[in-house]
Image: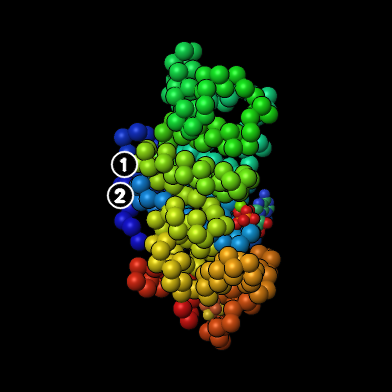
Amino acid sequence: MNAVLTPRAGARESNDTQPWPMLELERFTLRRRGVAVLDEVSLTLAAGQTLALIGESGAGKSTLAYAAMGLVRPPEVVFEGRLAVGDCDVGEASEKTLRTLRGSRIGMIFQDASAALNPCFTVLQHLSEPLRRHRGLRGADCRRRAVELLAQVGIGDPAGRLSAYPHELSGGMQQRVMIAIALACEPRLLIADEPTSALDVTIQAQIMALILERVRALGASAVFVLHDLALATQVADRVAVMYAGQIVEEGPVREVLGRPRHPYTRGLRASAIEFGAERLAPIAGVVPPLSAMPAGCRFAPRCGRASAQCSQRPQPLSIGGVRVACWHP
Ligand SMILES: Nc1ncnc2c1ncn2[C@@H]1O[C@H](COP(=O)(O)OP(=O)(O)OP(=O)(O)O)[C@@H](O)[C@H]1O
Ligand code: SF4
Ligand SMILES: [Mg+2]
């Protein structure tokens, strides 16, 4: 795992003088109505690194992303263990601290820009909100910065687009506007939850390349929630494979996806290869409901290698820089 670069200070209020390693989870569990939606998740993302979160639907990828933004937190859910963004312990931070973090230090790109943008606000109004709130810009300064941001995300005639409402923009342009909003205040961490899956395949690659280019230009860290393993290999330094609320394998992306050790990661990869060959071979079986998970390895009911030992929870092993939670990797 990468060293955490920040000094830790519990629930200290965040400020600009702290160095920012980005995300750290230590045996972090999130319970919703008594059910562990995230279960003892440990993860460290150093400053400037990019991480792909992959796994089947319902694995908890979005829940992790929303929890890191402080959008899902106590008392709505129960937190155990630690979830920190830089030096800010998200479970203990005040709502005021989290509001400062969001937009200013963490930017988020959602899956569906048409749902995330307010249909009653113009592009300028959307961009002005974070610029005013976190950068104190007003009037002509705000407008100038908004034009600059739209130009950076490849929107032609940026000044002319400021007065447009979301419905006057194509899906790709809406997504570009959302990227501009997320990056308006030059965040240190970007969280992008399936940022291109609502878009036409022809522009998915363009938008992904744009996000990556902006993240690199800012020297920011990024978490990409993805379903596409090939894309994960292209955009991320590290990957965390999630299954039923747990990280089952985590490490450098080429190592994990090039030589998967966990049976679930192997299954995902085999399924992706078969899918590429137009012979879809999904992993046999279905994810049990979170309220009825087996006590030991959660993947056991679907695993061809399961043994009696697998009725005990596997603790992560470190193999060649990769962490694998499996008794028989
Ligand atoms: N608001 C909610 N209330 C209750 N349960 C929820 C809520 N949001 C998510 N869940 C449950 O939490 C679990 C994790 O869901 P999550 O949306 O994080 O998965 P995901 O990995 O992002 O899936 P997908 O790939 O489909 O987006 C699922 O079992 C889901 O049904
Ligand atoms: S711990 Fe056992 S059941 Fe779980 S993935 Fe590994 S071999 Fe399969
Ligand atoms: Mg999701």
- Mark sitting on residue 5: 2
Residue at horizontal 41 percent and vertical 58 percent from the top? 238
Q: Position of residue 116 (x, y in %)?
A: 63, 36
Numbered marks: total: 2
Closest to the observer: 3 or 204? 204
Residue at horizontal 59 percent and vertical 68 percent from the top? 277
Closest to the observer: 161 or 115? 161
Whether residue 314 appears in this view of the structure is no
Residue at horizontal 55 percent and vertical 68 percent from the top? 273
Query: Dot 1: what SS?
Result: loop
Q: Distance between the residues labelled 1 and 2?
A: 7 Å
Check disc 1 and report the residue beneath it.
19
Q: In this view, does 247 lie to the left or right of 288?
A: left
Q: Are marks 1 and 2 in contact (CB under 8 Å)?
A: yes
Label 2 neighbour load within 10 Å: few <14, some 14-19, many 20+: some
Q: Is residue 44 above or below residue 95?
A: below
Quadrant of ligand 1 in image: bottom right
Q: In this view, does 324 lie above or below 190?
A: below
Closest to the observer: 120 or 299? 120
Lower sequence index among marks 1 and 2 = 2
Query: Dot 2: what SS?
Result: loop
